[in-house]
Image (cartoon, rainbow, N blue to C red):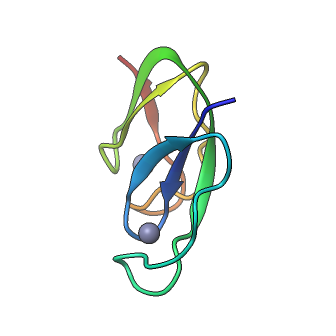
Amino acid sequence: MMKNYQCKKCKTHLTNNTTPAVFNCPGGGHHQWTDLGEVGPTNYQCKKCATLVKSKSTPAAFNCPAGNHHQWTKL
Ligand SMILES: [Zn+2]
Ligand SMILES: [Zn+2]
């Protein structure tokens, strides 16, 4: 199952079927990946960090790089 992952520290977003490698975060040290949920047909964008993801349902709110929780808007 493909999932959306985002690093809280460097904002990098990618899709993968397992948790991505943690090495070499541009934000310093290790990436801190957050599992945002299953990839799907609907576009969601966070009002705070501007991250755009294609998701099956509303992505997880945890660990917005802009602070606290993402605020997802369905596009
Ligand atoms: Zn990172
Ligand atoms: Zn966000």
Q: Which residue is drawn at 42% across and 26% down?
A: 44
Residue sitting at x 59%, y 44% = 61
Q: Between 60 and 47, which is closer to the camera in this rendering?
A: 60
Most foreground residue, 69 or 40: 40
Q: In the picture shown, does residue 43 fall above or below 72? A: above
Q: In this view, does 54 lie above or below 28?
A: above
Q: Residue at position x 33%, y 50% from top?
A: 49
Horizontal side of 15 relative to 45 (left or right) equals right
Q: Is residue 55 left or right of residue 52?
A: right
- Can residue 62 be spotted in the picture? no
Please say if 61 is above or below 32: above
Residue 33 rendering spot, x and y as whole percentages: 58, 61
Residue 52: x and y in percent read 35, 35
- Look at 68% across and 48% down and name the residue there: 18
Give the camera-side residue of 22 and 35: 22
Identify whether 57 is placed above or below 46. Answer: above
